Image (cartoon, rainbow, N blue to C red):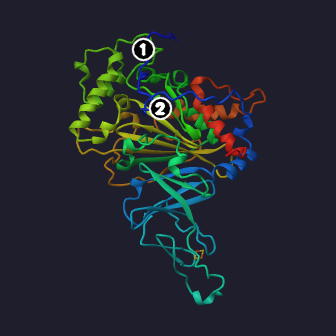
Amino acid sequence: MSVNYKVEWPMNLHAPAGSLEAKQAAVDNGLDVPDPSRYSSADYMKTEWEQLWPRVWLLAGVTPDLPESGDYHVFEIGHEEILLVRQDDASIKAFYNVCPHRGNRISLNDRGSVGKFTCAFHGWQFACDGTLLKITDEDTFDPRLIAHRPSLSEVRCDIIGGLIFVNMDGKAPPLREWIGLPPGYIENYEIDKMNVVRHVRSEWRANWKTGIDAFYETYHLPFIHPQTQGVMEDFSQYDLYPNGFSRMIVPIGVKSHRVGDQISVDPYQQFMMQEAGIDPTKFSGTAREVRVAIQQAKRSRGKRFGLEYYDKLTDAQLTDSWATGYFPNVQIGMHPEGVFIMRFLPHATDPERFYYDNMTMFRYVEDPGYTVPGWMGLPAGMDVTGATRPEIERVPVDVRPNLGEVLDQDVELVAAVQRGSKSRGFRGPLWSDQEQRVRHFHRELDRYINREK
Ligand code: FES
Ligand SMILES: [Fe+2]
């Protein structure tokens, strides 16, 4: 592979300090090499269930999934299920999905819309705000047993920019303080005005952290995903934020600096130009100039369609992916047309399984000239208008999730890394600067596991 280091890095190194795209100050996370047993040990998993999952804010859903009062959906993590319910005053409340009578699940569906919740076991009823409405044959209960009027058990819940978070033990700092990202960072994309157009939950043969690690760097792109070289820079801008949060800016629309020919336009670059409304046969620039041409085309298209939120996004944001890590288990690929939410959900009992949960969200614009971008990899014929919320496609382990070529390559990679992590010959991961987000994530995880937080 020839390496062409003379190519100018496409990132905005002169972004004003304090701006959202500015390179963040370095963080010294040391050089510790963690014991690889964290990727497979049942004890470590048990500690995570005690010290991590209940204590962090978890991304449980998105507001466009609950448009009307009485709309609800269920967030599952391990043994827990949490109901998110839109209230009459438009706020959202969260409850454990469990009946206080005998512990039946209140909702047996992923989602729905109700005037009140009725438990299927003995018919107890609860209002959408969780209060007890009716106990069947109440006079057969000793009044002392039900004097507290058992209601649904509430979970702390808060929202930023359309993203709904819950905190199970209720002791975390307020969400705005806890989210390590500056104000505007999330909100500028207006996720609350996008719709989930595809939701796939596939089960992978790996620890959830093996999954995270693989998605937190683009260092592996030339080797695992060589087909991205014609349209994506793999030498990303990596930024670390407080509380384990991080970002990588992945420039899209450019060839990797490792490609010798920076003149001729790659077929996938042509495809991207077409998507942005540029006729590639009339484009006379070089491969290096495609990204800026796409940015300009998108800028004017945003104005044409009255998409005012584009004004809050920089030119670079119009083409690039701001892949943003929300500690502990979420990465969101943020783009102006939509976002790709990946949640790495731990398996309830097996430390060597996780669920790769993807929600593809799209901002629908009613115009044939504004189409779903190719990076979303949506199968043909899907409804992208937001009129129907797709069901979760649950993909069992060892079945290809059909998420596109790149993610299929990751499924195999991640399983192989998981197997290798248990070898007696492996002493633990050695992380470079290009893997600084991985180190930052594990360092924060250590703080929870060691009760420093
Ligand atoms: S368990 Fe819900 S009414 Fe009995
Ligand atoms: Fe990958």
> From the Cβ of disc 1, is ligand 2 less than 8 Å away?
no
The front one of 28 and 32 is: 28
Specify few, some or many for label 2: CA neighbours under 10 Å numbering under 14, 14-19, or 20 or more.
few
Q: Quadrant of residue 143?
A: bottom right
Specify few, some or many for label 1: CA neighbours under 10 Å numbering under 14, 14-19, or 20 or more.
few
Label whose residue precedes the other's in the sequence (2 or 1)? 1
- Say whether residue 402 is visible: no
Q: Is residue 95 left or right of residue 278?
A: right
Circle 2 — which element?
Answer: helix
Residue underneath mark 1: 8
The front one of 93 and 198 is: 93
- Say whether residue 404 is visible: yes
Number of dots carrying numbers: 2
Residue mark closest to the camera, 2 vs 1: 1
Residue type at the position of mark 1: Glu
Residue at 42% in and 38% down: 334
Residue underneath mark 2: 405
Q: Is residue 274 left or right of residue 173?
A: left
